[in-house]
Image (tube, rainbow, N blue to C red):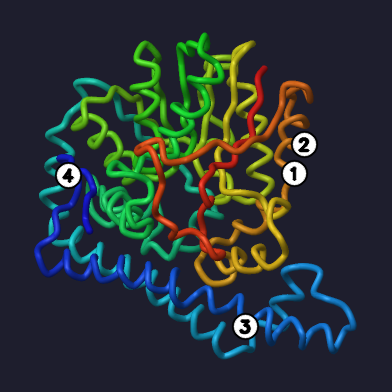
Amino acid sequence: MDQQFQHFMLPQPTDDELARQNFVQSLTMHISRNIYPGNKVLYEKLAKPKFEQEHQRPPQNRYEIREVMQDEPYYRWTSALKRINQEMLWDAVNTSVDRQLPELIERAKDQGSELGTLTLDPNFQIPTYEKAVDIHCMPGGYHSEFTADDIAAGATYDRGSYIYGVGWLGPLNDDIGLSIVQNHILPEYPDFRPRKILDMGCSAGNSTLPYVDGFPDAEIHAIDVGAPMLRYAHARAESLGKRVHFSQQNAEHTNFPDESFDLVVSHILLHEIPPPAVRKVMQESYRLLAPGGMMLHVEAPLYRHMDVYAQFMFDWQTANNNEPFWSAVRDLDLVTLATEAGFAADKTFEKFVPNGAWKAKVTNDLFKNGNSGSQGTWFVVAATK
């Protein structure tokens, strides 16, 4: 089952740790394919008729569906099972990372900065909204540090996201960036040659590195709020032979000069921050872009792209999985926010970009039936300046 690329910085599980991680993957698939779809049957045959009998109309939004589903034992059981599965995931990964952490820290130091750079800010203030919860239920979130030169958050995220996605993002967890580069930018803009590229909210740098390959002459920068994420991302990039300049910054307001980038991107960043911060990220993207530059923010589909039942099922992330802004951001009109930030309306658009650039055909159906994911495409809000 495990086909994650074994790069130098990736935590290496023992046989027992790998068995636990493989069990979590198997349980994830079992829940998704065999258990969770039963909620749709429950809704259509029991909950929806009950609501219609009481209100003389069908449910009109996800809140009304929640009203009739939240007390149904089957839905409560599947929700609890998904949450327990998520906690088991991080526990299985953390056991492995904690055991190897001193060695991983030394590996990161040994990588040095022969290609790219790492700039951390000892006085950096983590946004309150990031400290409020452990995002995705990942212990400590993206930013917490528990030892000197900590890289645990990055190592945990790199391994954990692969297990969570059952390899859906490819052996290097890079399908978001790779698909945007290979399935959108290069074919749609064959003459576009950005000199400087910025990846906002880069986490472990998984989606950053495809831009190094796609635009080998460009200077690549990547920012995140979490120092342990950035330490790991930098060491990972160096070990893979990729030149990236990582720095600890908030995408709402960076220290880069005006008009200093030709391409500004993010990959599932927006749903991790509150709507006011999303507006600031759009404004910052506009400020940073040189004339003729391009902005691309990648997300899963918005709620207006779904029927109300799918909205309700996706809303589980906000209600039960420490994703406080998941639903609020999916209610936003991101194109309007981009134009309010300064982008011309006729140069601002949204589209769906096929995923699975890491292989010809995506066969994993994990993210169907209301699970978090994009069901074959990445949603993009984009603009040129």
Whichever of callouts 3 and 1 sits on the residue coming sooner in the sequence is 3
Mark 2 touching mark 4, by CB under 8 A?
no
Q: Which is nearer the eye, 296 or 33?
A: 33
Which mark is nearer the camera, 4 or 3? 3
Secondary structure at badge 4 equals loop
The residue pinned by badge 2 equals: 336
Up-down relation of residue 7 to residue 286 (above or below): below
Where's residue 12, x and y in %? 14, 54
Secondary structure at badge 3 equals helix
Mark 2 touching mark 1, by CB under 8 A?
yes
The residue pinned by badge 1 equals: 333
Mark 3 touching mark 1, by CB under 8 A?
no
What whole-number distance in Å separates the C-alpha atoms at marks 2 and 3?
37 Å
The residue pinned by badge 3 equals: 42
Which mark is nearer the camera, 3 or 1? 3
What whole-number distance in Å separates the C-alpha atoms at marks 2 and 4?
42 Å
